[in-house]
Amino acid sequence: MEYPNWVLKHKQKGTEPRKIGDGYYLYKISSIWDKNFKRSRKITGDYLGTITKEGIIPPKHKRVLESYKQITVKEYGITSYMRSLSKDIEENLKKHYPYDHKEIFMMSVFRLVEQSPLKRFDFYYHNSYLSESVPDARMSTKFLGPFLRDIGSRRENMTEFMKEFVVGSEFAAIDLTEIFTFSKGVNAAMLGHNHKNAFVPQINMVLIFCLDKMQPGFFRMVPGSIRDISTLTGTINELGLKNTVIIGDKGFDSEDNVCALSDSELQYILPLKRNSSLIDYGVIKEGDRKEFDGVFQFEKRHIWHYSKTNGDEQIITFLDEKLKAEETTTLVSVVNHLKTKKKTDEIAKKINNFEMKLYEEDYKLGAITVRTNCDKSAEEVYGLLKSRMDIEKVFDIFKNILESDRNYMRDDKQLDGFLFVSFIALLMYYRVYAKLIEKKLLNQYSVLDVIEYLKRAHIMKIGKKFQFAEVPKKSRTLLKKLGVNFPDKPIP
């Protein structure tokens, strides 16, 4: 039989075209020696496909198998959700960093949702749907180090970007916890006393938080040797902020700082160490709750409180019974553990110290005392103090990653770039936090819960088409509660 040239051109060694009905098909053939007939016999093998003028169409089962080879699975849920909550952040990055906005945004997202070293960001990017919706972002390890230095060297751009988020009518100024670094090139890392009175190379950080908008608004890196009011007042004056309360930590309380704050006519809330002479524990020692000024509920805890006047300020003591029970349990566990160790003078001294706190100074357990000149209720003061603690806990997540990224933190500019990315990640964190408050889900889920559950929502890329993978039940439940509905087709 004669075949058209467009059919014959597909005939190669070990194959044979055949006409069946109106179609042409290609088969694999081979031959074996037939002992009975003493000659070779042709064996028809696998069907290789349909021959057309355009080429060979493989068999259906092979096309299916080939399509599976082209399937890639990418994370979709949390990064797409973060992007939907951060549209204004993305737009302001485009405005102030027109050529670098993609990279800054990607780094901030992965800083929050993965909480891992920079060297993994390229992997996360290419395994996320963000690599499809925001293509061509430069995320290689070699690029990120110099990029952070470049971003950190442009403080003016950084400041203008952050000012977009200094909004609202009430603000808190926070001297954020110390960031430790032993990188010799970081000049801002100066020897300073931290809250544990250790003398180590560190950097401090001033953060402005917008209270009524529930979001961070501004940050500034401060040399670690500086622990006075000038860093906070300078930032407040630079931004022209009114109605700002300074919320310090226990290491910030000193008569010099309090006098400087009073002279500057600034409001402040400063927690006191439990051995401070300003604290009157008499009310707690008496054990009569009628002597307290009152009680309020905060996050399912009953907080008792009383105050005394100290010149122009109030010394407010809060008693958290649940915290008292937790601290008592911890002390008992520590004492029992120490008693199992080999007896030495040092161990005996530690046991004696902890037992004194447990038996003789137990009235201090669960007590938190602040000095303040704010014209606010005890409940409002406590809420502001707790907001500082919450912010500090969140930022601790980013601080803990810093050591793993020490190779990228070789000078002040790189560190400032790192802190800027972490600041934007903090902005994103509070977007999720605000959504949990809006949906009344804060008693069921944390921000980290949202991140972990939504990470389980994936998308499959089959060839050039996208399809959502099955979402786990817990993730579906949370998505429904958040009011998130994935579209029929992924949004670019």
Image (cartoon, rainbow, N blue to C red):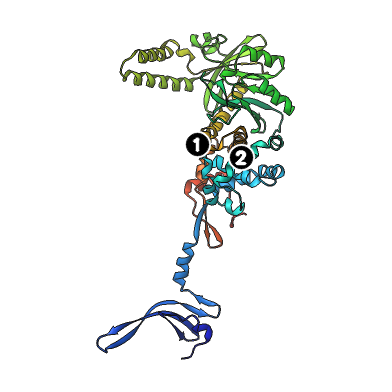
Kind of element beneath mark 1? helix
| Among numbered discs 1 and 2, the one appearing first in the sequence | 2
Amino acid type assigned to the residue bearing label 1 in the image: Ser
Q: Quadrant of residue 205?
A: top right
Q: Is residue 16 left or right of residue 180?
A: left
Residue closer to the observer: 59 or 219 = 219
Q: Residue at x 52, y 43 (%)?
A: 119
Q: Is residue 483 visible?
A: no
Q: Residues within 10 Å of mark 2 (few under 14, many from 20)?
A: many
Q: Position of residue 17 (x, y in %)?
A: 45, 83
Q: Position of residue 460 (x, y in %)?
A: 52, 57
Image quarter of the C terminus: bottom right
Residue closer to the observer: 20 or 212 = 20
Picture layout, residue 177 above or below residue 56:
above
Q: Residues within 10 Å of mark 1 (few under 14, many from 20)?
A: some
Outermost residue to the left? 36
The residue that label 1 is drawn on is 404
Q: Is residue 399 visible?
A: yes
Q: Position of residue 397 (x, y in %)?
A: 53, 34
Residue closer to the observer: 205 or 9 = 9
Contact check, label 1 and label 2, Cβ < 8 Å: no
Kind of element beneath mark 2? helix
Q: Residue at x 72, y 17 (%)?
A: 265
As drawn, the label of residue 275 is none
The residue that label 2 is drawn on is 148
Amino acid type assigned to the residue bearing label 2 in the image: Leu
Q: Position of residue 41 (x, y in %)?
A: 32, 85
